[in-house]
Image (cartoon, rainbow, N blue to C red):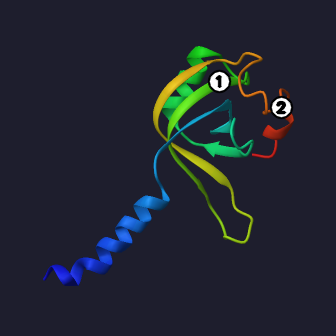
Amino acid sequence: MLKDYRPVLLLCALLAACHRESDVRGVYVAQDHSGALFLCDEGKLRVVNDSALRARYELTVGGHVPAFVRLRGIRGRSGSPKGGGQWWFQVHEILEVRPRVAEDCPGVAQPVTPLLSNL
């Protein structure tokens, strides 16, 4: 009977491996119903829809001010493997939220506001 479930177990293991949790650092700015996360190590813009992160952001830094964040969760991209789609990050745990200082994510451009209009 166990032999019949091997392909299903293998598929589940592969899917889990593709979407492993990771800790990330980045610059976060909330806008409208979603937030923009600029990862320090990638520089890619990721869309984040997480009400707990947004609430903590509002309490910590207020609106439309870049905040430094450390998060644990899953990175991903929607759309075709050939391009298009949107980068996203699913938050599982908020490790840190604080006002950004100059030393935080120096590879991420300071003026992130012009990029937010593209969300």
Q: Is mark 2 on a helix, strand or loop?
A: loop
Q: Give residue 116's position: percent from left, percent from top.
A: 79, 38
Quarter of the view holding residue 117? top right
Q: What residue type is labelled 1?
A: Phe
- Please give left or right for residue 39 compared with residue 51 in the image: right
> What mark, if any, has residue 84 been given in the picture?
none
Q: Is mark 1 on a helix, strand or loop?
A: strand
Is 69 or 2 nearer to us in this picture? 2
Mark 1 is surrounded, within 10 Å at the Cα level, by few (under 14), some (14 to 19) or many (20 or more) other residues, namely many
Proximity of marks 2 and 1: CB atoms separated by less than 8 Å: no
What distance separates the C-alpha of mark 2 from that of mark 1? 13 Å
Residue plotted at (70% across, 61% down): 85
Q: Give residue 66's position: percent from left, percent from top.
A: 72, 24
Residue plotted at (83% across, 31% down): 109
Q: Give residue 33's position: percent from left, percent from top.
A: 63, 39
Q: Give residue 94's position: percent from left, percent from top.
A: 48, 29
Is 82 or 86 nearer to us in this picture? 82
Is 39 or 115 nearer to us in this picture? 39
Quarter of the view holding residue 84? bottom right
Taking 111 as reference, is 101 above or below it? above
Q: Quadrant of the N terminus?
A: bottom left
Taking 64 as reference, is 24 above or below it? below
Q: Would you name the residue on which mark 2 appears?
A: 109
Q: Which amino acid does label 2 sit on?
A: Ala
- Please give left or right for residue 19 compared with residue 82 in the image: left
Q: Would you name the residue on which mark 1 appears?
A: 68
- Please give left or right for residue 103 compared with residue 21 in the image: right
Residue plotted at (71% across, 44% down): 42
Taking 51 as reference, is 42 above or below it? below
